[in-house]
Amino acid sequence: MDLDIAGTPLSTRDEECEPLLSVKNLRTEFDMREGTLLAVDDVSFDIQRGEIFSIVGESGSGKTVTAMSIMGLIAPPGKIVSGSIHFDGQDLRSLSERDLRAIRGSEISMIFQDAMTALNPVYSIGDQVSEALRRHRGYNRKESLDAAVEALRKVGIADADKRIRDHPHEFSGGMRQRAMIAMAMITEPKLLIADEPTTALDVTIQAQILELILKITEEQGTSVLLISHDLGVVASISDQMMVMYGGQVHESGSAEQVFTDPHGPYTWGLLASVPRLDSDLGKVLDHIPGRPPSLTDRPPGCHFHPRCMQSREVCGLDAPTRISAAEGHDVLCHFAAEPQWSANRVLGVAHEGSTHER
């Protein structure tokens, strides 16, 4: 066995250096009556072991379809057209449906944004939380229910030994989301995908749910792919992040890079729309004019140019190439490499040279 200078087996060291999840040039389409809907367009990113990676963007930007593609849950009329998805050394796209099912719920788990529709109303909470252990770990019914009780206790559900017999409609919204977390984490997966896990919950419950996810994933060493439109949440917990627009990656980098030195005009608009405690009292929040593009008929050139306050003639003609703003920090924009191109300008405000008006 080959060893490095510290005596660590090289195979082990290489495995630790490789990303847990590597998505390259992913393209997912839906054949619709109106035409081909390109929901995910040439998306690439890596998630390291133990890392929290976030995807942000408006509704319809391709965030959830990206996650569903990773899980192998794209059904007709949708299809993954091209690209690779490697998880823990395995090529997920080459696996049979049976092999994929063995990974889903065991090594990769997902928390869906609407627990009421994700949970089956017919089955008890206990049966649903414990199902993964029976399916993937070979537990019998008693063993799996005992483990489910412990999992529900871990997520803060009181009287868990009694509540496992309840059905989803007997749980509050926050309790249902806690049950979803218990269900997702009971097999101690290597990767947790959390799709808007705090949607429709009040602010206090949102904070509790996020704290719970962080606590459990840290205890179990789980990597997290967080999908969110809440920039405050993303800023507070993420290691790396990706901003999506129109099915493409608009900007990517460490959370610190994207929040402290954003180079993408769409990222500027998102940040400018977030309320700030240090802003002037009574100041009207900025916003991004217009609406996200139709994914069946996207604008030519840069897809963001009809809404961009920095748009120039070339933006409506030629598709931009990806530019490196710094090491590990990439932007899909024609002008991000210009020396004067800086997010220190007033975010979200039209500047000299812009071809758009509010």
Image (tube, rainbow, N blue to C red):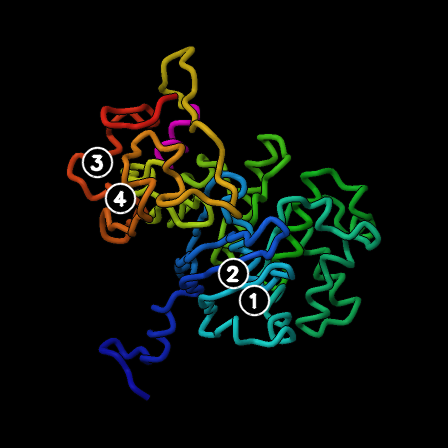
Tell me whether circle 1 and circle 2 mark residues in contact (CB < 8 Å).
yes
Label 3: which residue?
Answer: 341
Q: Residues within 10 Å of mark 1 (few under 14, many from 20)?
A: some
- Residue mark closest to the camera, 3 vs 4: 4
| Residue segment shown in magenta | 266-275
Answer with mark 4 or mark 1, whichever residue precedes in sequence. Answer: 1
3D distance between C-alphas at marks 4 and 1: 39 Å
Please tell me in which quadrant of the rendered image residue 342 appears. Answer: top left
Q: Is 135 located above or below residue 153 in the figure? A: below
Q: Residues within 10 Å of mark 2 (few under 14, many from 20)?
A: many
* Identity of the residue drawn at 40% across and 43% down: 303
Q: Residues within 10 Å of mark 3 (few under 14, many from 20)?
A: few
3D distance between C-alphas at marks 3 and 2: 37 Å
Label 4: which residue?
Answer: 334
Label 2: which residue?
Answer: 191
* Identity of the residue drawn at 36% across and 20% down: 278
Tell me whether circle 2 and circle 4 mark residues in contact (CB < 8 Å).
no
Q: Secondary structure at mark 2?
A: strand
3D distance between C-alphas at marks 2 and 4: 34 Å
Please tell me in which quadrant of the rendered image residue 301 appears. Answer: top left
Label 1: which residue?
Answer: 107
> Is residue 168 at all visible to an observer of this figure?
yes
Q: Secondary structure at mark 3?
A: loop
* Identity of the residue drawn at 22% across and 49% down: 326
In percent of width and height, residue 217 lies at 51, 54
Answer with mark 3 or mark 1, whichever residue precedes in sequence. Answer: 1
Answer with mark 3 or mark 2, whichever residue precedes in sequence. Answer: 2
Q: Secondary structure at mark 4?
A: loop
In this view of the protein, which residue sits in the foreground, 73 or 177?
Answer: 73
